[in-house]
Amino acid sequence: MNLSNKQKKHLKGLAHPLKPVVLLGQNGLTEGVLAEIENALNFHELIKVKVATDDREMKQLIIDAIVRETEAVNVAKIGHIVVLYRQSEEKKVDLPRK
């Protein structure tokens, strides 16, 4: 799914007050963590995930793996927090037109 800049900006605004729903610990990206991200995306559509690692390359690899495995869109990355969006069947988030 490709989002326009207008749509990403809208999603960033909606995500601003949200708290991270999934926190990656020292075990990194495991099957259990991926399952939790999947469940959160199915339920909320727009979520924040906290990737707690100081290594920038490792953080980017983890984010890329999450996006690839969940087929979500990386809306924004701020520090250790990544904002993910994936539209569900019920369409809980209304996106502006492109």
Image (spheres, rainbow, N blue to C red):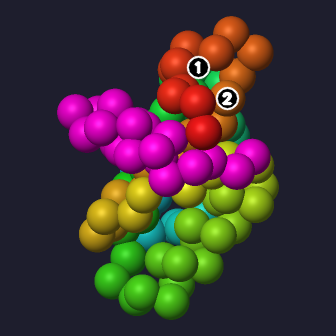
* Label placed on residue 7: none
Q: Is residue 19 left or right of residue 75?
A: left
* Label placed on residue 43: 1
Q: Where residue 42 appears, x then y in whole percent? A: 66, 25
The kind of secondary structure element at disc 1 is helix
* Magenta-colored span: 1-22
The answer to whether residue 51 is above or below residue 39 is below
Farthest residue toward the front? Answer: 98
Q: Which residue is mark 2?
A: 87
Q: Quick check: can you spot residue 36?
A: no
Q: Where residue 93 appears, x then y in whole percent? A: 52, 20
The kind of secondary structure element at disc 2 is loop
Q: Is residue 72 left or right of residue 48?
A: right
The answer to whether residue 71 is above or below residue 95 is below
**At x 75% / y 15%, what residue is drawn?**
89
65 inside magenta stretch:
no
